[in-house]
Image (tube, rainbow, N blue to C red):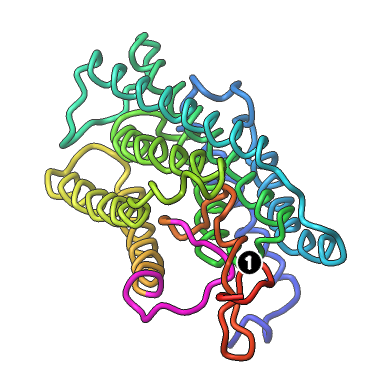
Amino acid sequence: MGLLDSEPGSVLNVVSTALNDTVEFYRWTLSITDKRVENWPLMQSPLPTLCISTLYLLFVWLGPKWMKEREPFQMRLALIIYNFGMVLLNLFIFRELFMGSYNAGYSYICQSVDYSDNVHEVRIAAALWWYFISKGIEYLDTVFFILRKKNNQVSFLHVYHHCTMFTLWWIGIKWVAGGQAFFGAQMNSFIHVIMYLYYGLTAFGPWIQKYLWWKRYLTMLQLIQFHVTIGHTALSLYTDCPFPKWMHWALIAYAVSFICLFLNFYVRTYKEPKKAKTGKTAANGISANGVNKSENHLVVEDGRKQKNGKAKGE
């Protein structure tokens, strides 16, 4: 007999039991959280993080509609300040994680979480919290695209990358603000120093973009990062590292999803035959949020190439 054929009382009992089990499981998960971070900003409840991510997704949906009949914003100065600010923030995070893990004697093969108030452990936890906050700040990448009407750059990869990183790292900070978690954040913050340096330089305009020949290598760095993450996590599983196993497996699955998406981007951008472009794509699957020299792009009319409306050779 199926659940729908049961007596109303028995159905209610099943639902009540399921709800009670869910509440008990939630209480148990709260009992094993990192007590050091529970009163830090955004860490008391997942609701603020979920609300910020929901507002982000709403802006992704409604922003282009709001901008449809408006002129794109010119934001060169804002982009320069933002991108170089992100360079400094990620450099700070990388430095704190490197120095904290070095002074704490961390192992790059297997490192369990130390929930004590040891000064080095708290330093690592604080750096990871800043890393989480930086992922929320990175939502501004998308805001700048939409306000500048670069909607073609707000791809699935772009939105998936930004939204999941901020949301999932809340879980990381809440339960494992240390241990193995330091490795991926340290590596990613270093790569983001290079990325935002590239973005900041592109914001100065076409005169400098011809020197930025190394953008494709940013995508390669990202792909290397994901493969290293999988290898590092697999090694931790092999050595039976005392770190939550479900987080290990979730991280592997997450890295695989990024490898698939970034490989698809790399092939479409650098391996397929070149097509006429109306926007410049950046190396990490999200367009450089600087000012693109493609704004002076060539067009073809009546078989003649034109630049800024003037036929070549006229």
Please state which of residues 143 and 287 is positioned toward the viewer in this rendering: 287
The image shows residue 229 at horizontal and vertical percentages of 26, 49
- 58 left or right, relative to 231: right
Q: Which corner quadrant of the image does residue 145 belong to?
A: bottom right
Identify the residue at the far bottom of this view.
302
- 119 left or right, relative to 171: left
The image shows residue 251 at horizontal and vertical percentages of 35, 52
Residue at the spot x=74%, y=70% of the render?
A: 9
**What residue does disc 1 label?**
14
Q: Which corner quadrant of the image does residue 13 belong to?
A: bottom right
The image shows residue 76 at horizontal and vertical percentages of 65, 41
Identify the residue at the far right of this view.
69
Q: On screen, 296 above or below 225?
A: below
Please state which of residues 198 and 178 is positioned toward the viewer in this rendering: 198
The image shows residue 123 at horizontal and vertical percentages of 40, 16
Q: Which residues are magenta?
A: 268-282
Q: Give the structural element (helix, strand or loop) at label 1.
A: helix
Residue at the spot x=40%, y=35% of the render?
A: 193
Residue 28 seen in the current view = no
Q: Which corner quadrant of the image does residue 114 belong to?
A: top left
Residue at the spot x=66%, y=64% of the render?
A: 151
Please state which of residues 221 and 99 is positioned toward the viewer in this rendering: 221
Residue 175 seen in the current view = yes
Q: On screen, 145 above or below 182?
A: below
Residue at the spot x=57%, y=72% of the render?
A: 298
Q: Specify the quadrant that holds the C terminus.
A: bottom right
How would you classify the magenta stretch by its main secondary structure? Answer: loop
- 101 left or right, relative to 176: left
- 59 left or right, relative to 189: right
